[in-house]
Amino acid sequence: MSEEASVSRRHFLTVATSVTGVVGLAFTAAPFIASFRPSTRARALGAPVAVDISKLDEGAMVRVVWRGQPVWVLHRSKDMLERLARDAAALKDPESNESQQPPYAKNDTRALRPEYLVVIGNCTHLGCAPIERFEVAPADLGADWVGGFFCPCHGSKFDLAARVRDDGSPAPTNLSIPPYRFVGDELVIVGEDTGANA
């Protein structure tokens, strides 16, 4: 075998061995590197949730889960918005000073757009799930009930802006408002806060 063929063969074997070693190292290191990333479940728990509101009728509500919590999107009718003003005197925190909400939701409707309420559906008393009771003056809630949310576990009552009523409700504060934003007139993105965009 000639000296030139021997050098060429050694060069080929060196390159082939190096390439094989690098590929093997990559296959070995990939699972370790991947283990440092959060799992799909962990990423999903904190990921924003898109809610399609294009077909949500007035007076209807849709429920989604964001970060393991129930989130409600209520499309309030004009009548529901008018009832909010009638209920203000019966509230513990009508100005939402003691409650959790983004700055753009610290208003009478607790919303970025008055017709849409986006709220976390956990009672601020013990974390139970209130139910929607949008009818006016039902027998079990009394003549002064103008619609809202009722927690059957301990009796907390919230108005149509998720503000707690001051009529013996054990909940200390209004229901929490998550960060959210609108994408046109069709989507609400819960979990993304880009400020007061309308």
Image (spheres, rainbow, N blue to C red):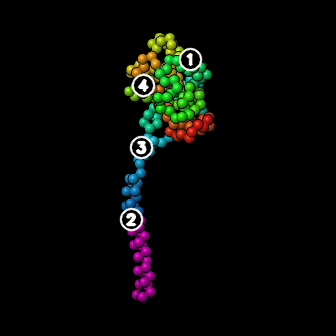
Q: Position of residue 7 (x, y in %)?
A: 42, 83
Q: Quarter-wise, where is residue 51 in the image?
A: top right
Tell me the crowding category of disc 1: few under 14, some 14 to 19, or many 20 or more residues within 10 angstroms, Cα based: few
5 drawn magenta: yes
* Secondary structure character of the magenta stretch overall: helix
User: Which three-letter amino acid code belongs to the residue tagged 1?
Assistant: Arg
- Range of residues picked out in magenta: 1-25
User: Of the residues under marks 2 and 4, which one precedes in the sequence?
Assistant: 2
Res. 172 mark: 4
**SS type, badge 4:** loop
State the residue position of label 2. Answer: 24
In this view, the mark in front (1 or 3): 1
Task: Report whether 79 appears left or right of 122.
Answer: right
Residue 84 in the image, given as x and y percentages of width and height: 56, 21
Q: Give the label, 3 or 2, closer to the camera.
A: 3
In this rendering, is residue 165 above or below 190?
Answer: above
Give the SS element for disc 2: helix
Residue at (41% x, 76% y) in the render = 14
Residue at 46% of width from left, 36% of height from top?
Answer: 66
* Residue denoted by label 3: 41
CB atoms at circles 1 and 2 under 8 Å apart? no
